[in-house]
């Protein structure tokens, strides 16, 4: 598939992931803020006492971001439009990039920033990287916009990259760009898509990426959320209020919004735990994820829910073991480099500590010959020893319990369920909530002590 046709497929099938309901009706700014039900469900006022995302840059690969929107002004860096080379901090006829940025890093406006849209990580910065997602007219046909966008984001300080769009097929250059991002320890977030089908595209399925589906106010999966075994997390994706570029505010359904909330949560965690790797950040989100009533005992990850919906306050405050460097993330594969010795590029499918094996096939050297000779002598010696001992023990039979001693045969001890299995652990009553409450209900006013303490 040519690059242009790939873009056309994305434009018609997924575009950027949101179903717009239209602009907000005439309403007070307080009503705009009050309509942000995910913030209430997350108990944002409590979690902002722990982290606001300050010092973290989140790249939004999307349409341009309108940085002069009153709810975003000051939080949007110039960025880059990879098609025309100019900045991506500009007004666009498509609201999507601005919408995603506001869900992540909106700060509101007015007295005490109490009006308008507020993002989950209001002190984080947005690095907009504009892509020709819906255009067949590529200014530089020999370039790869997605690969260029990922590398630009990594090289300009983004520690989280949000991709709320579909990309059916990845080129080798794009795969290398994602491997580069993994090497640089960037947290990569992608929306699963909005067709309600059990099929995820190559971008969503690529190793090292956190694939995010959508849930509603009750914590149940939205019926249009795409799903599959690669789904890792879910987040709010219905009736989500956000800022717009060609209209002040919009209301939307979509996994795009869900991905943006996960990117915001990652920004909060990266600010609070700057020494954790991207995999360890994913581990905190996975280990504290929630499930709706009646789903607590399911086998995880589930194709629809992944490990569950994010609970940012718990992820910030619970005592979670650091875990391995990669956490629940798989490591992207890369082709061996052409460097001398055949060393592999960081982010390969191995553990990262494996030695290169790209030796030339030029015959056995003297060292190899000597080694083989010594090995043969050792094997012969072992055979002689076994035969002598067998003759001495013929009358005694095998030891009790069969080969391997008491307990029977050779093998590994029984292993627990799959990695990061929750089996109801860390689940609290009420989706998203840090405090007990009925499913879908807003949490009560924060108590004197922050919840969870």
Image: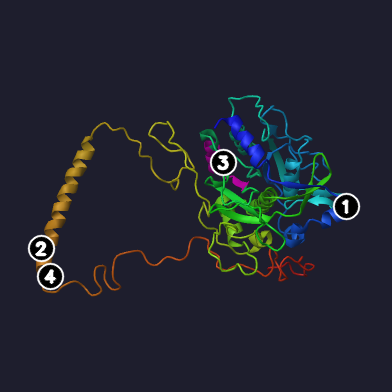
Query: Which label sits in the foreground, 3 or 2?
Result: 3
Measure the alpha-carbon separation of dots 3 and 2. 59 Å
Q: Earlier in the sequence, mark 3 or mark 1?
A: 1
Q: Which residues are magenta?
A: 175-190
Q: Earlier in the sequence, mark 3 or mark 2?
A: 3
As helix, strand or loop, the secondary structure at mark 4 comes to helix
Say if the magenta span includes residue 188: yes
Read off the residue under disc 1.
Answer: 29
255 in relation to 356, above or below: below
Query: Badge 2, how many Cα within 10 Å: few under 14, some, many 20+?
Result: few
Read off the residue under disc 4.
Answer: 393
Read off the residue under disc 3.
Answer: 181
Q: Earlier in the sequence, mark 1 or mark 4?
A: 1
Estimate the x, y position of residue 363 in percent, counting from the top left.
24, 33
Estimate the x, y position of residue 350 in percent, counting from the top left.
43, 46
**Labelled pair 4, 2 in contact (Cβ < 8 Å):** no
């Amino acid at each position: 598939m040519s690059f242009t046709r790939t873009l056309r497929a994305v434009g018609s099938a997924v575009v950027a992931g949101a179903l717009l309901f239209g602009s907000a009706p005439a309403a007070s700014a307080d009503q705009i803020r009050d309509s942000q039900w995910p913030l209430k469900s997350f108990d944002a006022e409590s979690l902002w006492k722990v982290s606001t995302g300050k010092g973290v840059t989140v790249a939004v690969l999307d349409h341009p971001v309108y940085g002069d929107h009153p709810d975003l002004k000051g939080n949007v860096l110039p960025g880059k439009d990879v098609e025309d080379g100019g900045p991506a901090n500009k007004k666009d006829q498509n609201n999507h990039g601005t919408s995603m940025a506001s869900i992540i890093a909106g700060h509101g406006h007015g007295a005490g920033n109490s009006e308008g849209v507020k993002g989950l990580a209001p002190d984080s910065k947005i690095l907009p990287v504009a892509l020709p997602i819906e255009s067949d007219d590529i200014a530089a046909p020999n370039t790869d916009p997605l690969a260029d966008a990922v590398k630009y984001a990594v090289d300009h300080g983004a520690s989280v990259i949000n991709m709320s769009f579909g990309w059916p097929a990845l080129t080798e250059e794009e795969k290398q760009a994602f491997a580069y991002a993994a090497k640089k320890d960037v947290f990569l977030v992608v929306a699963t898509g909005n067709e309600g089908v059990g099929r995820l595209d190559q971008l969503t399925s690529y190793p090292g990426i956190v694939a995010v589906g959508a849930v509603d106010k009750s914590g149940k999966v939205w019926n249009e959320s795409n799903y599959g075994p690669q789904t890792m997390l879910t987040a709010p994706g219905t009736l989500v209020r956000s800022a717009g570029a060609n209209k002040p505010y919009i209301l939307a359904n979509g996994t795009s919004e869900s991905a943006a909330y996960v990117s915001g949560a990652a920004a909060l965690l990266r600010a609070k735990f700057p020494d954790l790797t991207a995999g360890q950040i994913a581990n905190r989100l996975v280990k504290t994820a929630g499930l709706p009533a009646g789903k607590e005992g399911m086998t995880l990850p589930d194709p629809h829910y992944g490990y569950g919906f994010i609970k940012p306050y718990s992820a910030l405050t619970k005592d979670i073991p650091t875990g391995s460097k990669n956490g629940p993330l798989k490591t992207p594969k890369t082709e061996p480099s052409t460097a001398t010795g055949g060393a592999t590029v960081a982010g390969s499918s191995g553990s990262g500590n494996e030695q290169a094996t790209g030796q030339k096939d030029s015959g056995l050297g003297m060292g190899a010959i000597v080694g083989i000779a010594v090995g043969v002598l050792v094997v012969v010696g072992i055979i002689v020893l076994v035969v002598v001992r067998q003759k001495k023990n013929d009358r005694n039979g095998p030891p009790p319990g069969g080969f391997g001693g008491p307990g029977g045969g050779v093998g590994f001890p029984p292993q627990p369920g799959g990695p990061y299995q929750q089996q109801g652990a860390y689940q609290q009553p009420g989706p998203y909530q840090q405090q007990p409450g009925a499913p879908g209900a807003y949490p009560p006013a924060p108590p004197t002590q922050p919840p969870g303490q």
